[in-house]
Image (cartoon, rainbow, N blue to C red):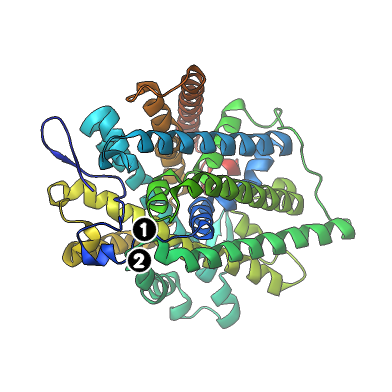
């Protein structure tokens, strides 16, 4: 659905709603019947992505107690920020505010709408490139922190041309991902989202089972409850916080998921159930990984699972379950990326929805998928870049923009407590982001990121 700015220019919603009363027959036949469980699966899949692999290293840097506290705090702030967004969207007098971008356009004009779209596009693009790199690492191996790690296919079949990254990634993209990214409704991904959550649970169960087994064998590492201030600076501690914020960034999928619910009132409890589920998964994986590997925990915990136990089967199961999880998360983020790029590039074509324009839909899908693929092949390591993006765009999407909407208070519905909380969210986000960016710059100039994909490896 479209809205107009004061100057008459058409503004594009971040993710257009699929309304059962839409004029398009295709959209008319497909809207508004998603269930509560479907929303939980899709929201949870939006949350649990590549961030899970860095959670164990986050516990190593921050210590167990501060890391778990920050996870809970970020989860609560995300719940509040989503409530802000849905409340102001519902308060809008027209369809213009039924999307995140439409709400930003209503509150801050074209600048706000375009700014949000750019932030979402950068965050999703970086995440998708990272997903393909991780999948390639799992299947075809990599070199992490000075050590060579063989991929699952290389371990099974040896180093052949078809087990190399240049072959495994395009096969995965064409055979598995392409059919999924061609689906035109978020709710169509509910089954793959459910399977992805199941795979994440399998990853959690295996890793926690290995930690429990190591505990009974007396091979567990002693965890640090508090950060080690003797060997790391406060800058490094603040750099770990955006990793958690990135892990909980899902706000760009709130409106499309909400628009397809048969009862929009289910959105609030669905978000809370998803946040609780994902927080438990993050905490379990973080504790398990940190207990297993201690101070040797790498920023990519999958690298630690390279022949980490007496059972190669368990090592492969851990890595494959995680890689397959990312394969199924990929189309959900790609859905958001495609719509945002469409809104930015084809702003004058938004009177016809993207899903109803086959030419625009297919061309954007092909171009973006090719871009993500080429970047994943050409760039051996994007973790440093993603760390910068995560310290800016993800923090803006999840905390700064929702807080700004409340402070703008377009409809005069914010209470004093709402504005106070919104101000705190923005201040915390800006301070944390600035310190993290500064720390990353210092690390780069000091040469501390030689082979490590993240400052968490320091």
Residue position marked by numbered label 1 in the rendering:
334
Q: Quadrant of residue 59?
A: top right
Residue 246 appears anywhere in the view: yes
Foreground pick, 275 / 301: 275
Q: Residue at x 44, y 73 (%)?
A: 168
The image position of residue 178, as x and y in percent, is 35, 71
The one of 208 and 227 positioned closer to us in this rendering: 208
Residue underneath mark 2: 181
Q: Is residue 123 left or right of residue 340?
A: right
Q: Residues within 10 Å of mark 1 (few under 14, many from 20)?
A: many
Q: Earlier in the sequence, mark 2 or mark 1?
A: 2
Kindly indicate whether the residue at mark 1 contacts the one at mark 2 (C-beta within 8 angstroms): yes
Q: Residues within 10 Å of mark 2 (few under 14, many from 20)?
A: many
State the residue in front, 219 or 317. Answer: 317
Q: Residue at x 35, y 66 (%)?
A: 181
Q: Secondary structure at mark 1?
A: helix
**Residue 238: image tag:** none
């Amino acid at each position: 659905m479209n809205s107009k700015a004061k100057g008459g220019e058409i503004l594009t919603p971040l993710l257009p709603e699929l309304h059962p009363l839409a004029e398009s027959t295709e959209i008319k036949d497909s809207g508004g019947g998603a269930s509560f469980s479907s929303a939980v699966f899709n929201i949870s899949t939006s949350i649990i992505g590549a961030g899970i692999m860095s959670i164990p290293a986050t516990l190593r840097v921050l210590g167990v107690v501060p890391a778990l506290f920050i996870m809970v705090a970020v989860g609560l702030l995300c719940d509040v920020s989503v409530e802000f967004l849905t409340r102001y969207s519902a308060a809008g007098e027209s369809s213009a505010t039924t999307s995140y971008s439409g709400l930003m356009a209503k509150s801050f004009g074209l600048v706000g709408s375009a700014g949000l779209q750019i932030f979402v596009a950068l965050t999703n693009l970086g995440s998708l490139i990272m997903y393909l790199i991780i999948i390639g690492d799992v299947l075809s191996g990599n070199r992490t922190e000075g050590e060579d790690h063989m991929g699952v296919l290389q371990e099974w079949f040896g180093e052949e041309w078809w087990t190399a990254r240049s072959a495994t990634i395009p096969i995965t993209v064409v055979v598995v991902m392409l059919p999924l990214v061609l689906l035109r409704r978020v709710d169509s991904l509910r089954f793959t989202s459910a399977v992805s959550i199941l795979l994440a649970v399998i990853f959690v169960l295996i890793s926690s089972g290995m930690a429990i087994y190591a505990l009974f064998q007396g091979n567990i590492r002693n965890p640090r409850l508090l950060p080690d201030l003797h060997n790391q600076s406060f800058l490094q501690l603040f750099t770990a916080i955006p990793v958690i914020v990135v892990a909980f960034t899902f706000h760009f999928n709130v409106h499309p998921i909400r628009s397809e619910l048969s009862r929009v009132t289910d959105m609030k409890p669905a978000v809370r159930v998803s946040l609780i589920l994902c927080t438990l998964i993050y905490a379990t994986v973080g504790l398990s990984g940190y207990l297993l590997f201690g101070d040797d925990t790498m920023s990519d915990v999958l690298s630690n699972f390279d022949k980490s136990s007496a059972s190669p089967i368990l090592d492969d199961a851990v890595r494959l379950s995680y890689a397959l999880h990312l394969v199924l998360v990929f189309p959900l983020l790609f859905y958001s990326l495609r719509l945002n790029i469409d809104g930015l590039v084809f702003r004058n074509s938004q009177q016809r929805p993207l899903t109803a324009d086959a030419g625009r839909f297919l061309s954007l899908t092909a171009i973006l998928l090719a871009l993500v693929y080429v970047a994943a092949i050409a760039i051996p390591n994007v973790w440093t870049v993603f760390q910068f993006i995560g310290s800016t765009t993800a923090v803006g999407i999840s905390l700064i923009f929702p807080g700004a909407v409340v402070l703008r208070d377009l409809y005069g519905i914010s209470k004093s407590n709402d504005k106070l909380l919104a101000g705190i969210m923005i201040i915390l986000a800006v301070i944390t982001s600035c310190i993290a960016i500064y720390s990353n710059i210092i690390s780069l100039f000091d040469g501390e990121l030689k082979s490590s994909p993240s400052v968490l490896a320091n």
